[in-house]
Amino acid sequence: MTQSRSLQWPILTKDDLLSAATDLIEELVERFRDVSSLPGNKERSFVAKLQNVQKKIDHAQRAIGRGKQKQADNALNAAINQMGAFLNELDTVKEKRMPSEAFVWSVEQSADAVIDQLARAREATLTD
């Protein structure tokens, strides 16, 4: 007699995905507040960009609460674009090799994860 097992994957809603993105952004903000080796005090610029992304996420969550899919998706598109600008600015710092390569790599990984969460949330329907 063979046994069968079924795997159950949790279904993530837009809110779940946006909460995960928010957690990653909060972590990134803390990492930039703790670093002081960026040229020209760029850490403030990075924090401001991340805070602007969070504002777009908050806007998307309010739109979701009102059942406004298109408004939520527009806010998520803006947040994704802002994360792209964040990564572009990070590239300019990487060229100067400050801070460490490991720091930049880990930030890039987290930023990519934020973009992934936002893109997945954008693709999810309000009924998910």
Image (cartoon, helix red, strand yellow):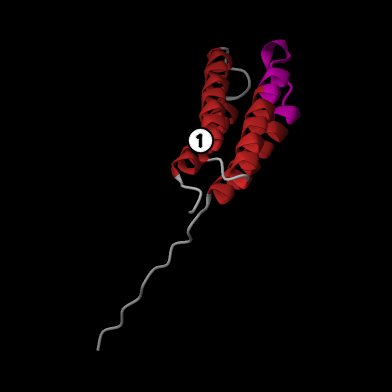
Q: Is residue 41 above or below residue 125?
A: above
Q: Is residue 116 above or below residue 92?
A: below
Circle 1 sits on which residue? 70
The quadrant where residue 96 appears: top right
In the shown orientation, is residue 12 left or right of residue 42? left
Amino acid type at circle 1 is: Lys
Q: Residue at x 42, y 67 (%)?
A: 8
The quadrant where residue 101 appears: top right
Q: Residue furthest left?
A: 1
Under circle 1, the secondary element is: helix
Q: Residue at x 59, y 44 (%)?
A: 64
> Range of the magenta residues?
32-48
Q: Is residue 85 visible?
A: yes
The quadrant where residue 44 appears: top right
Across and down, in percent, residue 79 comes to 56, 29
Q: Is residue 35 magenta?
A: yes
Q: Is residue 18 above or below residue 111?
A: below
Q: Is residue 33 magenta?
A: yes
